[in-house]
Each structure stands twice: as structure tokens, then as C-alpha cells.
Image (cartoon, rainbow, N blue to C red):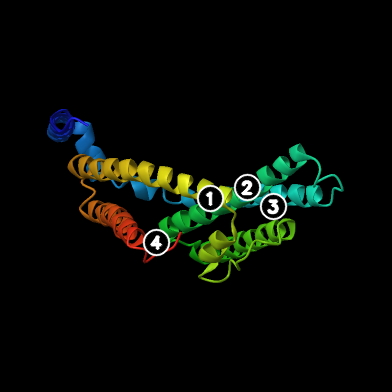
Amino acid sequence: MNVRKSFIKIVGWLILGAIFGIAGSFINQRWQLMEELAQRDIFSSIQPYFFWIHVIGTGLLLLISFSCYVQSKRIMTSPDLEEDEALSDKLDQFQHRALTSSMVAMILNFVTFGVSVEVGNLRILVSVGVFILVMLLSSLIDLLVIKQVREQDPMKKGDPSKMRFDKEWLESCDEAEKMLIYQSAYRTFSLMKQVLMFSVVAAMVSKMIFDTGNVLILVLGTIWLIHNLSYTIYARQVEKGKINI
């Protein structure tokens, strides 16, 4: 690695970021339309629609998740499952889709419910009920799929209702499964480094143009800091043998 060339590239990225920042500031000062958008409470006008996004979005995702679980349950009863590799792969796909859809439903549930919690929201009690129902159904589907996986592979350990589930599940995986998890985790870490950095920059530009304030910058910056520091700390602990993988 050529340190000089790498440093020049970093400086170039910083200069490019400064150019975008100056351009954003110029737009904020010159464009009357941007000023009107900043003064207008646009979000409050679209806020009522989040109730329907909450209900319909989470409902569809849970329906997809449950249907995938039902399909995987049917495959589990097939007598050719152990001998048919294609059927086994199909089972894995349905289980993966069930868990992924349930996870997205859970996240959408939190986000849309958080947005709907406003003073004067006449549907707040309904939103609370939908939030709790989605939490319960999503957790139930996760438990059913994990139970199904454990029936397929009795070596798997862990109870999703316990805090130690991830640790116990990882310990019960074979070496190939662990390697898949490690590689996926590293790629996720690398992606999130970029996503968080650009999110903070976007929040800074949003503050200049739309006057969104400092809270968003502080929250994203804190998450970015925790994300990077946690990797550094855990990597050091693994290196010293304090954490077994």
C-alpha cells in the first residue's frame, strides 16, 4: 500500500465533501423553494398515512413470513427430504424467507409506530394494539421456524426467548456455518461503515437545507462511533484470547 497515494485519495474525498457542503449551503441561501420547504411542516401532512403503512405493510410481511413457514412445514413432512438435496435447499430458502420477512416486519413495526406517536393522533390506541400484535406474531413465527430448524438438525441449540440465544446458536453450528456467519458479519460491518458515514453527511446537508436540527446528526454520529469502536474493542479481545470464536 502506498501511504502517500492513499492519503491523497482521502484528501480528495474530503475536498469533494466540502464542495458538496458548500453547494448545499449555496442552494439553501439561493433557492426560495428550499426555504419554503424548510418552513412548511411537510412531515405532519404525510404523518397520517404512516398508520396505514403500519397496518398494511406489517400485515403483508407477516403474511409472507407465515406462508413461507407453512411451505417449509410441508417440505419437512416429505419422506424424500434427507435424500433430495434440491428439496433440502428449498426448505432452507423458505425458512430464510420466513425469518427475513418477520425481521423486516418487526423493524417496520417500530419505525411506523414511532412516527405515529403524536399528540392529537386519534388512532393512537389502535396503533398501540397493532404494534403489540405485530410484536407477538413476529416473535411467534421466529420461534416456530427456529423450532423447525432444530427438529431438522438436533445439534442446534438455543432458545430465542433467552438473551444467550445468539451465543448458544453459534456454538452449536459446524465450522462451515460459522465461516458463513463470520463472512456475512464482516461484509455487513464494512457496508455499515459506509452507510453510517454517508448518513451523517446526509444529515448535515439536511440540516443546512431543511433545518432538521442537530438531533439526527448526534444520533447517527453516536451509532457510527459505537459501531466502529465495538469492532475495534472486540477484535482486540479476540486477539488476546479473552473471547472465543
Spatial separation of the CA atoms under disc 4 and disc 3:
31 Å
Residue 32 x %, y %:
18, 32
Task: Tell me which residue sits at (25%, 53%) in the image.
Answer: 221
Element under disc 3: helix
Crowd tier of the residue under label 3, counting other residues whose Cα lies within 10 Å: few below 14, some 14–19, many 20 or above = many
First of labels 4, 3 by sequence position: 3
**In the image, which disc is placed on residue 96?**
2
Q: Quadrant of residue 219?
A: bottom left
Vertical comparison of 27 with 240: above or below:
above
**In the image, which disc is placed on residue 66?**
3
Task: Tell me which residue sits at (14%, 33%) in the image.
Answer: 7
Q: Nearer the viewer, mark 2 or mark 3?
A: 2
Q: Residue tagged by mark 4? A: 118
Residue 142 x %, y %:
62, 59
Task: Tell me which residue sits at (87%, 48%) in the image.
Answer: 79
Element under disc 1: helix
Crowd tier of the residue under label 1, counting other residues whose Cα lies within 10 Å: few below 14, some 14–19, many 20 or above = some
Q: Is residue 220 visible?
A: yes
